[in-house]
Amino acid sequence: MAIGHDLGHNAAQPGGDSRERAVTPGDKKGIAPGYLWSMTTVALTTLLGLPLRGHIDPTNMVMFYLMVIVITALQWGRGPSMLASLLSVVAFDVVFVPPYDTVVVHDAEYILTFIGLLTVGFVVSSLTARVRAHAAAAQEREEQAIAAFELSYDLATALTVDEIMARAVHHTQRVFDVAVAVYWPGEHGLSVQQATVDYRARESDLPVVEFALRYRRPAGAGTETLPNAALAALPLMTAAHVVGVLALQRPSQLLPPQRRLLESFANQVALALERAQLAEAKNELRLVQERERFQSVLLNSISHDLRTPLVAITGALSALQEQETLLQPSARAALVTTAHEQAARLNQLVGNLLDMSRLEGGTVQVKRELCDLQDLVGAALERNAPALAHHRVELHVPDSLPLVPLDFVLMVQVLANLIDNAAKYSPPETTIRIDAIQRGHMVEITVADEGVGITPDELERIFAKFYRAERGDRVVGTGLGLTISKGLVEAHGGRIWAENRAGGGSLLTVALPLDNRPLPGREECDERK
Amino acid sequence: MSESSLRILVVDDERAIRRFLNVTLSANHYQLFEADNGKSALEAVLVHRPDLVILDLGLPDMDGVEVVRTLRAWSQIPILILSVRDQESQKIAALDAGADDYLTKPFGVGELMARMRVAMRRLSGNTQDALFAGGELEVDFARRLVRVAGAEVQLTPTEYDLLRLLITHAGKVLTHHQLLHEVWGQSYTDELHLLRVNISNLRRKLEPEPTRPRYLITEPGVGYRLRV
């Protein structure tokens, strides 16, 4: 443990010396009541013993006075109990020792008793007072230990650097009752990172804090360095390096045990901060590794997707080139058709990859203008005309719908993708239904099919990159269509989601805002009327 | 064999694409000329006097739009541009500068031929026949009469002008700018919603299924086309 060295604290002293006595509980109540108490109890004891005068040996009263002295010592400390001793002797002499009502004694033996009572009184006072001080010191040590434990526990459960600092200032304030802050080194020097609400940061504090940081020693009030400063600064350091500075504003004079506790705090906080920093660094490293691993998987996947159609194309064309004479016209026609289809698939994949990369690079520009939804749906259907050849299409896009602000080209792409999916994932001769309705300040366009639907756990995943729904026989498509659609819809400030239809099949909904609210993110919004 | 074949100039810096076009078009009895950059394209037009230019927008030395503009300064030769999917703005600029139609790469032969035919139709006889008939749509320009499936349809003057413009360029794409400019005038070229509303109205009046138009086709981001 790294501890500051110039605070002038001593090694733990075995109990009462004049400085430690200053914080014993009795003092907190004030001195005067103690003396009052002594006088009162001595008087009371004397009065109570009065009826017994003459019937018992006066020396018996000494016991009662001793009791008063001990109790006073325990409750009120040395001063009052010494007074009690003195008063007891006097009272004893005057009231109980014949001749009554005078200080003079006839029997010289009683002088011994007086001396005895006084001496025992004084000794008992001192000893009891010391016992009290021990107890008080022990209690304070226990309190400090508890404070240190609580801090330690709280720090152990804090995860981030900020949390640790927040808890540190909180605990320090609780125990030391001052405004606390943690200074953290940044690009422009030290600055307050976390502080209690009553902490007032001032420029004039900085030299003190900087000293503590640079020289790894406490500075400010209560130290040898800049002792007139209004704050005390402790470096938060571990064996390796200094991570920050703990600053206490206008600390009251701290006694050695409190200083020790404060240093212990500083050390614990420093350790916790170092731990948190290391954890964060480890996390980052793990993320980087994850990202790299993911990217290499991605690259493999893309490479495979790009090459697969090429296999068919190259194969078909090379067969046509080299085996022309062997092939029947029908065979040649089949090869040509295959090559053509695969080329289209490759084209689509390339387009999707480019779209995806533009979406992620933030270079997609959404140019909104008021558009007719019928126009939009019509254009999307037109684009998918060949795919829809074997499906029935039902449209419910009412004339009464308002014009919607959107980027026509981008939204056609989205709708075309949804329609394409509906066609791909539902059997021929089934119906694909497209609706558009207004809901409040949004408009919802839905594409419904009568296919097998989507399993509940896939409802969100289908929008993930490269996700291809398991459909058994063929894997069609690039797995990017819905991801791109989602990106484009969200760039409009809209939402897209999938559900299953009650009667079987899937339902994809695109919700777009009808107002010209600002668009999210980096995409530009160029609005024409 | 003796019919003079139409002459096509192909401008593309990619040799493979030139070869593909050459082979295909020659097989269809067109006479082919090639150029691989803007400057030589302009020269080739002067020298060979083609009937149609197929122009790729991504040329090494000049912006394809610049080529169109320069050509249009002194020639009404039909121009078909080849564009890439993500170059919408360049495509629109080329069309606004005077190109007749476009093809998005990669394209098939069928599309190419269809577009070429439409672009060159101007060369053969009257562009403005008094009567137009396509599918169930009939328009009698002389009497300002529009009929769908035999039933007469009432159009507003603006709707009629819009329809007539599209019919005049039947089969070709017309950009938003061109449509607005021709039908509404110079100061209306930004009033896209006017165009959309009128197209929407026309569809409701003329199309059996307005949401799945048969005649008035939207070219997303570019404009509209009357399908023939």
Image (tube, coloured by chain):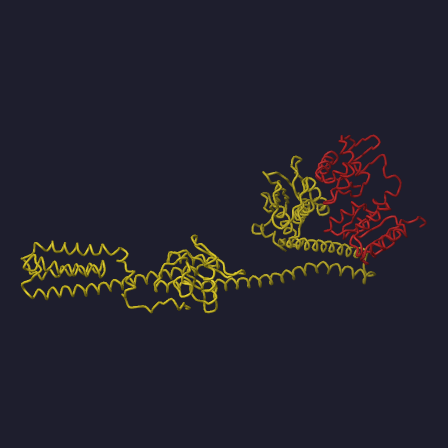
Chain colours: A yellow, B red
Total marks shown come to 0
Considering only vertical position in the picture, is A380 above or below B39? above
Residue B32, image x, y percentages: 88, 53
Which picture quadrant has residue B204?
Answer: top right
- Quadrant of the drawing holding the N terminus of chain A: bottom left
Position of A505 compared to A379: left or right? left
Q: Nearer the viewer, residue B137 or A496?
A: A496
Residue B74, image x, y percentages: 86, 46
Which picture quadrant has residue A56?
Answer: bottom left
Considering only vertical position in the picture, is A187 above or below A384? below
- Quadrant of the drawing holding the C terminus of chain A: top right
Which residue: 73% across, 33% down? B205
Which residue: 13% across, 65% down? A115
Examine the rendering and report whether any part of residue B29 can be seen.
no
Considering only vertical position in the picture, is A152 above or below B228? below
Residue B200, image x, y percentages: 71, 37
Examine the rendering and report whether any part of residue A269 can be seen.
yes
Q: Nearer the viewer, residue B53 or A165?
A: A165
Which residue: 82% across, 60% down? A324
Position of A77 compared to A484: left or right? left
Q: Nearer the viewer, residue A411 or A499?
A: A411
Residue A19, image x, y percentages: 30, 64
